[in-house]
Image (spheres, grey):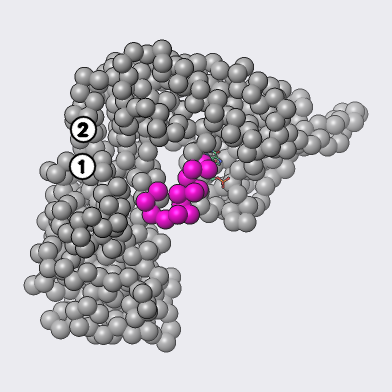
Amino acid sequence: MSPTSPATAEAEALTSQAVPAAATEEVVVLDYGGQYSQLIARRVRECGVFSELLPHHVGAAEVARRRPKGVILSGGPASVYADGAPRLEREVLELGIPVLGICYGMQLLARELGGRVEGAEVGEFGRSQLTVRDSGRLLAGTPSEQTCWMSHRDTVFEPPPGFTALAASTASPVAAFESHAREVYGIQFHPEVIHTPYGNQVLTNFLADVCGCERSWSPRSVIDEQIDRIRAQVGDGRAICGLSGGVDSSVAALLVHRAIGDRLTCVFVDHGLMRKNEGAQVIAAFRDHFRVPLVAVDASERFLGRLRGVSDPEEKRKRIGAEFIRVFEEEAAKLEDVAYLVQGTLYSDVIESGGGTGAATIKSHHNVGGLPENVGFDLVEPLRALFKDEVRAVGAELGLPERLVWRQPFPGPGLAIRIVGGEATRERLETLREADAILQDEIRKAGLYRELWQSFCVLPDVRTVGVQGDTRTYGNVIVIRAVTSDDAMTADWARLPYDLLEQIASRMINEIRPVGRVVLDITSKPPGTIEWE
Ligand code: XMP
């Protein structure tokens, strides 16, 4: 593949700033479209080795440029015999770097190197029993009988010549193979999912014993590395960072502050659409505790003014987004010589925006309430190489309060898009904010906060009849929405305990005068979305 090909440009775009300094050891995961590809990269990192996910077609030269200690070929939905099925570039096997194929990746290796892969009569999906005949290097230290997680129809029936078949399962005559001499390894099962109890051991065998990785990637090393990098980029310049109170912008700001000290100024725009006490917590953490120069702007009047009479959700988003940029730019203009803008872009954003049209569209929609890319500053993006859980680990290492480290995602337009079908007035915001505070309080007390992807309240613009004491009431409805999810693309409604729900509902009705009824949303995504607007 030529150096100027679109795939190479894509890989460069994906990794510019993502790759740590050359000294950092790295393992490349080539993505064949499997649902667990990102998880493989995350697991490798959990084993202490930096790992990057690249599209499978980037080419051997691109892989070699990173001088990885190992290459992992991910699973994927195709059959190796299908027309147009993604291929393995032969040169990848000639780089002299150990290769591990997982599922589809193993089948590609088998086919390329002269083994026999065929469609089996029955597929193998879910838990399976693995019998190890020869543990070799790859399965060393794991028992001869073990469970593993499978998800395939095609199966390797014979390993390539010169390879040892290590294990079999009910539907996979060759469920693992290796050639120590060629440094090529394959497993049909998924070591990256938790249902494979010895998966971590298998990955560690590959990373440590086969590739000789030193396991030096950790939140501590990320911090040191990024501080050097930020200093090199910003020099003696000045930077600005928009703090939202979310974990991404908070960790990005702290890292940059560690690197350049008071040459960073944070701007926190309180648009009046935050949850209870959120603004105060951000100010207490950054200004009072970390002593980061912080401009906190109370712009709630401005935002509420812009939202007057607006009930259409997209119009709300547009107006809030535009107003946010206006306020931020006004504050930025008051600071002198600022050339850099700090943003909390994550590795998953980087992968998504390079990884497909659908993902990119979803992102732009959800970016409402953020800043456009061309605001006239150079971007500093210290989290570009990190997954969300790594950002949390770095945040904890930097001393960020637990509440900010584990904060659930919160939309940029805030509570305004949770007042559904009507205007976000001050009174309604107050009702919603109080209801939300009760919900969070009870969920935290029940120890469920971290288990939920998001938990929040919605206030529809309707009133319903009730009776309190001997009086007829005509009050607001509060909807409880709580979901579990891995990435917000799909979500399931959380099965909160009945007693907890009762406690939440009765507190809302007793403590918040306008609330007359509480209901629970039991819609998953799809078909619903997480938010109501
Ligand atoms: P939906 O409602 O589409 O939401 O299932 C998926 C995730 O995106 C968040 N979300 C937003 N985030 N600005 C944001 O910054 C927005 O306008 C916005 N709308 C939805 C939502 O909270 C969930 O985490």
Instruction: Specify whether 200 is left or right of 194.
Output: left
Residue, disc 1: 20
Please count the marks in the image: 2
Tag 2 near tag 1, CB within 8 Å: yes
Q: Which residue is mark 2?
A: 229
Amino acid beneath label 2 = Arg
Q: Which residues are magenta?
A: 353-366
Please, what secondary structure does the residue beneath circle 1 have? loop
Left-right relation of 501 to 281? right
Residue at 38 percent across and 54 percent down: it is: 355
When asked about the image quadrant of residue 347, the answer is top left
Instruction: Identify which amino acid the numbered label 1 is placed on.
Output: Pro
Percent across and percent down for residue 281 are 47, 21
> Residue at point 76% right, 35% down?
461
Label 1 environment density (alpha carbons within 10 Å; few <14, some 14–19, many ≥20): some
Residue 64, position as x, y percentages in the image = 15, 57
- Relative to 498, say whether 33 is above or below: below
